[in-house]
Image: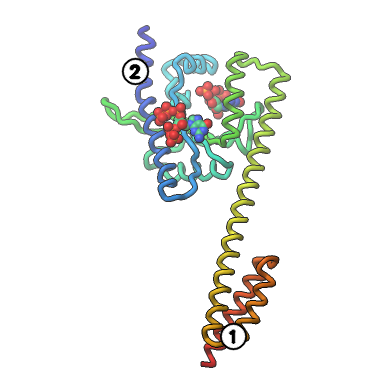
Amino acid sequence: MQRIKQWNRILLPYEQAVEELKVKFKAIRNEFRDMNEYSPIEFITGRVKKISSILEKANRRNVPEDRIEDEIEDIAGIRIMCQFVDDIYEVVKLIRRRNGKDLEIVYEKDYIKNNKDSGYRSYHVIIRYPVQTALGEKNILAELQIRTLAMNFWATVEHSLNYKYKKNIPENVRLRLRKAAEAAYQLDEEMYKIRNEIINAQISFEEKSNSVYEISNNIQMLSLFGYKEEARMFQSKFNNLWKNGSLEDLQDLSKEIKYAIQKYQAFE
Ligand code: 0O2
Ligand code: 0O2
């Protein structure tokens, strides 16, 4: 009982750190949203490890109780979920920019480029984080896990199966989990490709609209300046390109009309 009380006291700054870090990462997400910009952070969760799990991990790793706070790095854990793998590296950059300011990076582990045997993928950053307590500043270790929604789905299910089987998952299930991890990786890749195709299609649509707008305006201008024959000729060229022309064809026509306007202006 006394031991639990003592641990509850030890864990107080860890709870404070988790709350503060959640607020800080949520603030980053909200800033992007307020600027109407895409946020690399989808959502954040956090937890303080249960006392029983801390002691079990310490026991498994032969860590004496007075070394637990220095050697168990994930007593405070923050999980940052992203839509795409690229977003994970954006978040890592954001964290690195804060290194030496409100946190200190101890080390990083890239389980995306080097996934674990289980199939686990995520990016881990171990930080030292200062917490202001009633007794002064306390520096604690915290683990930031950054992963995509697909990685999180896989890790959550795998973690609960490990719990169910008390870490003795049958070999055939382990194999299927590895395959499922590969499927989650493929899903991340495919969603990223689809997203990029949509973004590129949007950019191309906007550029096409801009060219069409420019061409129509400039043809009208030619007509207003009295170059009706030329305006008719460009209008007919434009009518041919309007439905089937490529973006490059439209941009070339737009340049041609602008050049003609400059030429006629020079004569006036
Ligand atoms: P928002 O704006 O709704 O995303 P809290 O005390 O609320 O700060 P707590 O108690 O840790 O945080 O909550 P929890 O259950 O860990 O979830 C943290 C945030 O993640 C919550 O949002 C959840 O809505 C969100 N969340 C959890 N799972 C998912 C998920 O699968 N998809 C999405 N998109 N969000 C999820 P907030 O903090 O209320 O803010
Ligand atoms: P929790 O709170 O139950 O998630 P280890 O000694 O292998 O336990 P280590 O060396 O401290 O761990 O760090 P590691 O391997 O970098 O990862 C620590 C955390 O990453 C784990 O915490 C998990 O949250 C997550 N993780 C690592 N490998 C796997 C995996 O194969 N599957 C899943 N689902 N998660 C993994 P804990 O200790 O399990 O705590």
**Residue 196 image offset from top left, x and y in percent:** 62, 50
Out of 114 and 218, give the one closest to the viewer.
218
Which mark, by number, is residue 53? none
Quickly name the residue at label 2. 9
Q: Secondary structure at mark 1?
A: helix
Q: Earlier in the sequence, mark 1 or mark 2?
A: 2
Q: CA distance from mark 1 to mark 2?
A: 86 Å
> How many tags in the picture?
2
**Residue 14 image offset from top left, x and y in percent:** 39, 25
Q: Is residue 95 above or below residue 63?
A: below
Residue type at mark 2 is Arg
Q: Is residue 68 above or below residue 77?
A: above
State whether residue 141 appears in this view: no
Residue shown at 69% from the left, 22% from the top: 174
Do the CB atoms of the residues marked 1 and 2 lie less than 8 Å apart?
Answer: no
Quickly name the residue at label 1. 228
